[in-house]
Amino acid sequence: NTVVVTLSENQTQNPTVYLFKFTNQQTNVDYYFVAADTSVHKQRYNQFTVTETDTPTLLNGQVSLPEDGFYNYTIYQTSLASLAGITNINQVVSAATIPLEYGKVWVVPSASAVVTYTPQSDTSIVYQPE
């Protein structure tokens, strides 16, 4: 999935590593990951590739979101200029400084999980004189 946002207007450190936090609205569980900005015009917009997978590499734009439904997201600036020497996501979480963007994400159920109902007649004869 390609995500396009405008983070530069609130950013105070350049370069920075962007930390994404998704919070499930029903369970309040937080999911963190880092994604690289692939925009060619970073002063105008920021573009990220985010992959939802069961076995994510959290420092490489991948995340596992086990529940379908809505998530609140926050994208943070960190005090890191790069991921050099970083081995796990907790190191990046502890380096988060200021939130740059807030929003909402909808994780759509897979096609096999969508329930389809077949309509049935709901007409009932209550009284029928002879």
Image: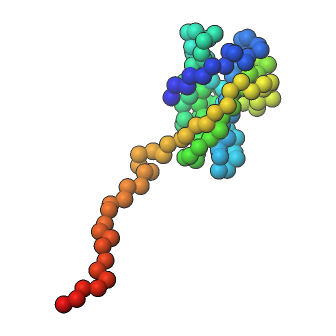
Residue furthest to the bottom in view is 130
Residue at the image position 72 percent from the left and 30 percent from the top: 89
Residue at the image position 68 percent from the left and 27 percent from the top: 101
Percent across and percent down for residue 24 are 65, 44
Which quadrant of the view contains residue 32? top right
**Residue 36 at least partly seen:** no
Residue furthest to the front in view is 129
For the C terminus, give its image quadrant.
bottom left
Q: Is residue 27 above or below residue 95?
A: below
Residue furthest to the left in view is 130
Percent across and percent down for residue 55 are 58, 37
Percent across and percent down for residue 29 are 69, 45
Specify whether 111 is left or right of 77: left
Specify whether 49 is left or right of 30: left
Observer-nearest of 61 and 39:
39
Residue at the image position 30 percent from the left and 73 percent from the top: 123
Observer-nearest of 82 and 100:
100
Task: Identify the image's colour scheme: rainbow, by chain, secondary structure or one colour.
Answer: rainbow
Residue at the image position 59 percent from the left and 15 percent from the top: 45
Which quadrant of the view contains residue 16? top right
Which quadrant of the view contains residue 124? bottom left
Percent across and percent down for residue 104 are 61, 36
Observer-nearest of 63 and 40:
40
Observer-nearest of 93 and 105:
105
Badge count: 0
**Residue 67 at least partly seen:** yes
Q: Is residue 9 above or below residue 71?
A: above
